[in-house]
Structure formats: C-alpha cells, structure tokens
Image: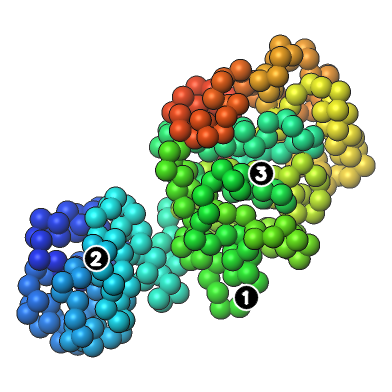
Amino acid sequence: MKKKLLLADYDSEYLRELSYYFMEQVPQFELALFTKEDTLLAYLKGEEPGDVLVLDEQLANEKISSLADTMTKIVLSAGGTPPKGFSAVKKYQKMSDLVNQILMCYAEDHDALEVVRGSSSTQLLAFYSPAGGSGKTTMALGTAAASARMGLHCFYLNLEEIDSVRGLLEQTAGGLSDLFLALNTKGMNAGIRLKASVRQEESAGFDYLSGVESISEYEEIQEENVRELLKMIRSLADYDLVVIDLSSGFGSLTRAALEEADRIVVPFVPQENHIAKLSRFLAESSLHDRYDALFQKMSLLLNTIVPWGGQAEGVPEKIRSRIPICGSIGTYPLLADWRRLLRESEQLIGCMGPVLQLVRKDP
C-alpha cells in the first residue's frame, strides 16, 4: 500500500519540481500538494490525512502540528530552528539528497526500512592480500572512485582492524561502532542506521562509513557480526557495488568477509616476502577444504607501481596456476596520492580497467 506524502510550499514552482522528482524516483508515495495554508488545514482535518508532512518553514505552526500529530513532520528549512515536533532538512540542496533525508526521517520515525530499500543487485567485491604493502587500499579506493564515476552506486567499506583511511575520509554521522551495536541490539534496525550514517565522498562520489571508534572493539566483534553486516548491506539492495577493504591477516573476521564476498581481488607485488606469504596462504588450501571456495573467487591484480616490470612471468607458476591474473595496474602518478586519487577519480576508469571488468561480470 502506498504511503501518503503531503508537500506544502508557497513557491509553486519549487513544489512542482520537488513533486516531479518524487513521482519519478519514489513511486511508493502518493502525493498531495498545497500552496495555501487554509487548504492544507482543511485537508489535515480529514479522517486519514496522510503519513508524512513536508512543508516550508513559513507554513509550520502549532495548529498544523497538532492536526498532523500522528504524521512524520518535516520542515524545509533555510537555516532557522524547526518548531517543536518537526524535523528539519535543508531546503536548497541537491534534490536526491533532499528526498533521501525526507525518506530517512520517515524510516527512523516508523522503523520502516522498506521506504529506503533500493532495487539494485548488490555485488560484494573484497580486496585482500596476506602481505602488507601490496597496494590493497589504493586499489580498493581506486575501484570505488572509478565505479562511482561510471555511474554505479558504490559503497566503500573499510574493515581493516586499524583503519588506514581514517585521516583521509571525513567523519560520518555514525560509524561501524553504531552499526555493530544496532546489529546486536534487539529492536534496532541496522539498515536504517546505516542509511542514516553513510556519507558521500564529495569528489569521488562513492558512499562510505567511518570505522570503529576504538580498535579494541574488534576484540568484541564476532565472526557472525561481520556476516550479518554484509548480508544486511546486500539486503538493502541500495548499492550496485560494495568495495570491502580488509586487513592483511587471516583471522575469523577477515575469513567471514571473504566468504560472504562475491569476488576477491588480490593485489600482488612479486617481492620475496609477498611471494612467501601468498605461497603459504595457498598451501593452506591443501590442509583445509573450506578454503577452496575462497580461491575460486580470487583474481590476482599485478601491482606495477613498483618497478618490477609487471609481466605475468614475474609471478611464480605455483601462484598463477591457482589464482588467475585479471590484469595489472600501471604506474599512474595519481595512485601515489590518495587525495589526488579522490579528486581526479574520472581518470581512474582506464587505470582500474582490469578490476572493472570483473565488476561487469556476474558473480
């Protein structure tokens, strides 16, 4: 059943544009439009006035508030303090952001995740390497930025125990700490908490969420918490692609994320320590059958940022016979500077081509 949304504003042109966006992008709402206070008041006195009331701050008053007592009440604010009982969203902003904030107000008010659930077929793409210094986070950020530039709705999720992008990405309204708490607390909707917390990186265009408040929290986080988190993100159906940036260890939390992922990209530099660690990792598959499924999802991404030539012959046969090589990443200067990577993300589409080809394939 459709929800009823009342939109009221003295500016008929603005109201028309807002209503057009709702009709095109949010069909689960039935709209009623008002440009006069008296007609809005008369409508609110009806038996079933509606579910959400969104109105210009000049129209918000105590009489309207009392008549819309059971509704989610939102003022379109130009900067003033909202009246009691009203939430406020910034009136003049990007239309998609405005509508999303309105939907979030209703979802939080009524614990109604269905109004913010998307229709995407979400793919989980994990970046993992057992060796540090392989360029894992650079490749993950580059993929997220390039995917967003291609028009995909992309979410960058850093699950490193020590978050390497904490100083790069601005703090979000909520973080992983809040999300794990929501997953563990009966009655809290983690999906709504995620939607309310994520932030879009302004230059690159992907969404992200800040990490845990303290790395000691990972001592309390369980394998099942990570599985629930990724399953919840997938069930939201809001993102085309989720890029998961993982720690280099192989503890239970990392294994859980790898098992939930659709594809796993393994950045690789053929240096002695990288070869040794990846070889040891591969050897585990002969001891534990449970890891075979992980290797079937893996693709090796050759990191040629370091000057070794980048040819497949530089990868030992025992490694490339087990993990197929999807391509190599060349010496692009912007990959050496994460902030530049975000600012000039459009250039990454060609650079990250081997990974983007994996994204285009069905998991």
Q: Where in the figure is residue 318, as x and y percent of width and height?
A: 85, 23
Measure the alpha-carbon separation of dots 1 and 3: 28 Å
- With 74 as the anchor, is 147 left or right in this view? right
Tag count: 3
Amino acid bearing label 1 = Thr
Of the residues tagged 2 and 1, which is closer to the observer? 2
Residue under label 2: 76
Measure the alpha-carbon separation of dots 3 and 2: 38 Å
Residue under label 3: 164
The residue lying at 64 percent from left, 37 percent from top is: 137
Q: Nearer the viewer, residue 93 or 279?
A: 93
Measure the alpha-carbon separation of dots 2 and 1: 33 Å
Per the rendering, the mark at residue 93 is none
Q: Earlier in the sequence, mark 3 or mark 2?
A: 2
For the N terminus, the image quarter is bottom left
Q: Earlier in the sequence, mark 1 or mark 3?
A: 3
Compared to residue 242, the image places residue 62 above or below, namely: below
Q: Which image quadrant is residue 136 in?
A: top right
Residue under label 1: 185
Q: Residues within 10 Å of mark 1 (few under 14, many from 20)?
A: few
Q: Where in the figure is residue 336, as x and y percent of width and height?
A: 60, 26
Amino acid bearing label 3 = Ser
Amino acid bearing label 2 = Leu
